[in-house]
Each structure stands twice: as C-alpha cells, then as structure tokens.
Image (tube, rainbow, N blue to C red):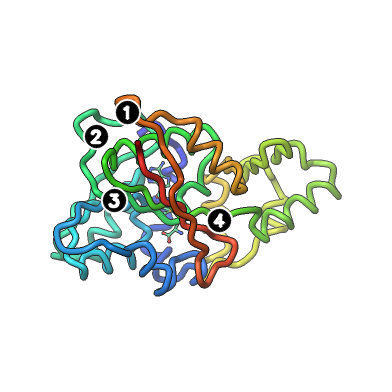
Amino acid sequence: MLNTKADAWDIIGSLFWEQGRQSAKPSQPELELFTKGIGEGSRVCVVGASTKDLVDMLLDRGAEVTVYDFSQGMCSSLEQAMGTAPVTIRQLDITAPLDDELTGSYDYVLNDRLINRFTWAEAKSALMNMCTLAHDGEVRASIKLGHYPMDLRMIAMGEERGTLASFYDRETRTIDFSRAGTVLDDALLPHGDIDPALLLEWYRGRAAEKRFEDEDVVSLATAIAPTNGKNAYIVGRDTFADAGDTTLFTFIMH
Ligand code: SAM
C-alpha cells in the first residue's frame, strides 16, 4: 500500500466506533437516510470500515454488503467485530486506480464523511472510482461542509504565531495536520474518550485534508468522468438531522 494515510487509521481500529465522538458517526435518522430504498438483495458497498453501524443496518435490511477500506487495521477490527455476519471486507484504497472488473458491481456506494479526509486530488479520484463502482446505480456520500471547530482553533493559533502558511492553504482551504507542529498539540480537541496521545498521532498521519463548500462538491462532480463517457450528476441533497453542517449528496451517472 502506497497511501501512507492508512497508517493513521491502523492505530485507531475499533476505537473509532467504541470510544470516538458520537457526532462523528451517523445517528439513527442519518442511517435511515443512507439506507432509504435499500432492501433484500441490493448490492451495496460501504467505503470506510469505521462506519460499522451502517454495515449493521444494511445487513438487517438483507442487502449484500461489501466494505472497502485502505487500512489493514480497520479491516481486521471490523472483521473481528462482525464475527460470522455475511459481509465481505476488502482492503482497497478508493483513491488509487480501480480494477476494471469492479465497474458497475454495486447498486449503491455509501460513505460517511470520507471525502472530508481527502485533498482535492484525492476527492476527485475517489468520487470517480465510487461512481464507477456504482456505474448504473447511486453514490451516497455525506460531506461535512465548512471547517471543523479544531481547524478554526488551529488557524487562529497559526495566525498568532506566524506559522499558518506552513500548514494551511487559504485558497483551497486545505489543512495539513502533519505540518502544524505544536499548533496541533495546543489546539487539540477531544474525540470522545480516545487517548490524546493517540489522537495526535492519528491527526498527524491523516496529513492534508480539504474543507468543502457546496460549490466544491458541484465542481467535483463536474470534474470527473466515471466510465463509458457517462457524467456524474448530483441528484439529491439531504441535510443530516443531527449534524446540520453535513449534507448527504446523491450522485448518479448518466
Ligand atoms: N465519519 C466516519 C464514520 O462514521 O465511519 C469516519 C470517516 S471515514 C468513513 C473513515 C474510514 O475511511 C476509516 O476506516 C479509514 O480507514 C477509511 N479510509 C480513509 N481513506 C480511505 C481511502 N483512501 N480508501 C479507503 N478507505 C479509506
């Protein structure tokens, strides 16, 4: 695996769903929104093994579920947690070139705030791959719009200390946790009950992430060309019930 961001998730594993911040996971109404219309025999892929509650709900609905994650640690933790449940879990980097034979394998490709973990270039590759996986179906991707409270603390501290330019690009609203130095330590906010030392390691490993506005998501859809000359279109926007700054975008290819 060439994507070094996976190392950050290897150290988190099941802590994400066991001890992580509740608001970083989809709530019950948000899970209902994700799974609307999905039933017996639907071919569904979840990108991100951390979204365990969504996997559980999909299995309850009788869907055929595959989970992709680039982190071996996250895959192993989910495998262990799922026991004998009929779910396929595979290691795959959604930003890397996709195997042609996976084209159109799923009716639905779902992911919760995964795009928030990406730079613009990574988000483009990932959305293109997700749209290719759901070639004749739907991609449902929730995206938190705007900055996180911790970003704003870091930006303020970076301004005060004159180090902002070393870890934040204003033009693209991209923050690089690996370059923030002591600003990260000093601006760190709790994430549920996860140990702060581990959190620091996790953020540093997550490295560069773009912050999105609605217009960026529109540009993202326009910038990609999934497969066979199809284009991607946003056909739905639903605001999350318990996280008002997060929108569930539905993309189809046409
Ligand atoms: N809010 C989310 C949740 O409830 O699970 C967490 C954000 S995202 C879904 C986190 C998951 O995506 C982690 O398990 C991480 O390993 C995985 N991930 C991050 N980047 C990835 C990539 N490029 N390819 C595949 N999986 C990735």
Where's residue 211, x and y in %? 61, 47
Vertical position of residue 137 compared to residue 224: above or below: below
Residues tagged 1 and 2 counted as in contact (Cβ below 8 A): yes
Mark 1 or 2, closer to the camera: 1
Name the residue type under label 1. Thr
Question: Would you call the spot at circle 3 few (<14 residues within 10 Å), some (14-19), or many (20 or more)?
Answer: many
Select label 4 or label 3 by which is in front: 3
The quarter of the image holding the C terminus is: top left
Alpha carbon distance from label 4 to label 3? 20 Å
Residue type pointed to by label 4: Lys
Residue 15 shows in the view: yes
Q: Are marks 3 and 1 in contact (CB under 8 Å)?
A: no
Amino acid beneath label 2: Thr
Q: Residue at x 32, y 64 (%)?
A: 36
Q: Quadrant of the N terminus?
A: top left
CB contact under 8 Å: marks 1 and 4: no
Q: Secondary structure at mark 2?
A: loop
- Across and down, in percent, residue 5 comes to 46, 41
Residue topped by disc 3: 108
Per the rendering, the mark at residue 103 is 2
Q: Which mark is residue 144?
A: 4
Q: Looking at the image, do the residues carrying marks 2 and 4 touch, with CB atoms under 8 Å apart?
A: no
Q: Secondary structure at mark 3?
A: strand
Question: Hey, which residue is sitting farthest bottom in the picture?
Answer: 28
Asked whether the residues under the numbered discs 2 and 3 touch, taking CB atoms below 8 Å apart as contact, a structural biologist would say no
Q: Is mark 1 within 8 Å of ligand 1?
A: no
Res 65 quadrant in image: bottom left
Q: Counting residues from the N terminus, which is met first, the one under dot 1 or under dot 4?
A: 4
Give the image location of residue 39, x and y in percent: 20, 63
